[in-house]
Amino acid sequence: MSDFLTTRTKFFCTTGTAVNFAVSSAGSSSVTHKGDKVLTTGAKLSASGICPILTAAAQGTPQPCKFKQTPWALFDMKSSANGNNLLTANSFCTCPIGGMIKVRAANAQGFQTV
């Protein structure tokens, strides 16, 4: 049994905590647990806040995060929903300007393979 992420999962950027990430789309998951969709490799994140890398490049002038999501890595290779693999607590994506977007609070749920 694996722990799969749900829409209640919180994410953070490894370059700093001044940016908040929210799940804007769970992907094409039809799997739910207690009313929350399970996240798949089709999941999309949105970001808001001040980006430390861009701020440093602008000589300390606060710069908003301009997050462009890359494909997910370290997802479950054996479990999927609607053709997309399920995300686990080890899953992450990268930010093209630097840093990785990782799980802060998993809120993961155990499921049997689907």
Image (cartoon, helix red, strand yellow):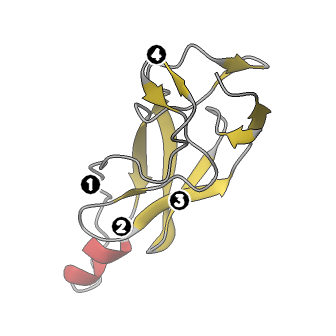
**Residue 108 x, y percent position in the rendering:** 73, 41
Identify which amino acid the numbered label 1 is placed on: Lys
Q: Residue at x 45, y 19 (%)?
A: 28
Q: Looking at the rendered structure, which numbered label has been put on residue 82?
A: 4
Kindly report which numbered mark, 2 or 3, lies closer to the viewer in this rendering: 3
Identify which amino acid the numbered label 3 is placed on: Lys
The CA distance from mark 4 to mark 3 is 24 Å
Q: Residue at x 30, y 71 (%)?
A: 98
Q: In the structure shown, which secondary structural element does the residue marked by tag 2 occupy?
A: loop
The CA distance from mark 4 to mark 2 is 34 Å
Looking at marks 4 and 3 on the same chain, the residue that comes earlier in the sequence is marked by 4
Kindly report which numbered mark, 4 or 3, lies closer to the viewer in this rendering: 4
**Residue 2 x, y percent position in the rendering:** 72, 41
Identify which amino acid the numbered label 4 is placed on: Asn
**Where does label 1 land, which residue?**
66
**Where does label 2 land, which residue?**
51
**Where does label 3 land, which residue?**
102
